[in-house]
Image (spheres, rainbow, N blue to C red):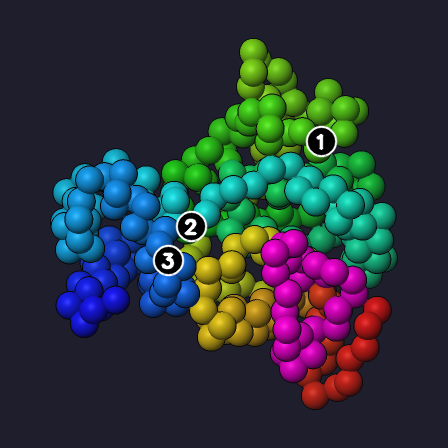
Amino acid sequence: MSLVDNVDYEVFRRKVLELTRIDLGLYKSQQMQRRIGSLMERAGVPTFAAYGRLLERDPEELDKFSDYITINVSEFFRNPEKFDELEQKVLPELLGRSRNLNIWSAGCSNGAEIYSVAMILEDIAPRGYHRLLATDVDSMILSKALAGVYGPQDVRNVPSARLERHFKVNAEQYVISPEMRSKVQFKMHNLLADPFQSGFDLILCRNVVIYFTDEAKQDLYNKFWQSLKDDGVLFIGGTETILNARDIGFAPMSSFFYEKAPRGKEVGVG
C-alpha cells in the first residue's frame, strides 16, 4: 500500500470512529482493509475517501458497513459439544457456588447465544433469579435479537424438545417465546471503548475478537478477568485461543473454557 493510500485509510479510520465509535485502529489492518475493500467494490466507490463520504451521507450504507465489520454471525448452540459441556459441567459447578447467576454475552450478535443459555438454565436451574446481559456495538443486530425471529439454519442445533417448547413456527421463521425474551437484557456496548461491569459468574465472548490486534485482545481479556468473580468462567469461540492465559490469570479448563484464578499464583489445567 502506498503512502497516499495509508493516509487515505487513516482519514477514513477517523471518519468511521466519528460515525460509529468503532476504532478500526484496534483491528488487524490488512484483514480489515480487505473486508472494507469488498464493501467498497459492491458500493462502486474507488477510494477510502469516497467511501467515507458515502457512509456520512447514506445511513443505510453506514448500517450495512457496521453490520459487516462487526461480523454478526451466530446460531443457537454453536459448537453443540461445547454447549453440552456448558450444561453438564460448567454451569452446574457455578450453580454450586451461587443459586443466582450473573451472565454476560459480550458481542451477542442476533441473541442466539444468550437465548441458548437461557434455555439451559430453564431446564437445570428454573428457580434461580439469573441475570442475563447481552451486549453488542451494532444497534441493528440488537433489534433483531430483541425481535427473536430466526431462520431454519439458526436453529438447526436446537434439540427438538427445546425447539417445540420455546419457539413458535411461522412458515420458515422460528420466533422465540416471550418468556425467553423476558429473561434477557439487551444493551448497546462497545467492547473496545466502553467501561465494563463486574461480578459475572460467566462471560461468553465467542468468535468476536478474530480481527482484533494482539494488543486489543490482551486489553480485552484483562478486562474480562477483572469483570469475573473469583473462579468465574470465560467461554470463547472455536477460532480463538488465549495464548498467554496464565499470565493474565486464567486457568484453562478445556478448549474454549477458562477459569479466573488469582494473579501471581500458579494456575494449572482443570
Left or right: residue 159 versus residue 115 is: right
Q: Which residue is mark 2?
A: 70
Residue 236, by quadrant, is bottom right
Mark 2: secondary structure: loop
Residue nearer the viewer, 13 or 197: 13
Q: Nearer the viewer, mark 2 or mark 3?
A: 3
Percent x, y of residue 214: 49, 72
Mark 3: secondary structure: helix
Mark 3 burial class by Cα count in 10 Å: few <14, some 14-19, many 20+: some
Disc number placed over residue 32 in the picture, else none: 3
Q: Residue at x 53, y 63 (%)?
A: 197
Task: Give me the C-alpha separation between circle 2 and circle 3.
Answer: 11 Å
Q: Earlier in the sequence, mark 2 or mark 3?
A: 3
Disc number placed over residue 158 in the picture, else none: 1
The quarter of the image holding the N terminus is: bottom left
Left or right: residue 203 versus residue 62 is: right
Which segment is the magenta one? 232-257
Q: Is residue 73 above or below residue 147?
A: below
Percent x, y of residue 238: 65, 54
Q: Residue at x 64, y 77 (%)?
A: 244
Task: Give me the C-alpha separation between circle 1 and circle 2.
Answer: 25 Å
Percent x, y of residue 254: 78, 62
Q: Nearer the viewer, mark 3 or mark 1?
A: 3
The quarter of the image holding the C terminus is: bottom right
Left or right: residue 159 versus residue 202 is: right
Q: Is residue 264 magenta?
A: no
Q: Is residue 97 visible?
A: yes
Task: Give me the C-alpha separation between circle 3 and circle 1.
Answer: 33 Å
Name the kind of residue labelled 2 in the image. Thr
Mark 1 burial class by Cα count in 10 Å: few <14, some 14-19, many 20+: some
Q: Is residue 56 visible?
A: no
Name the kind of residue labelled 1 in the image. Val
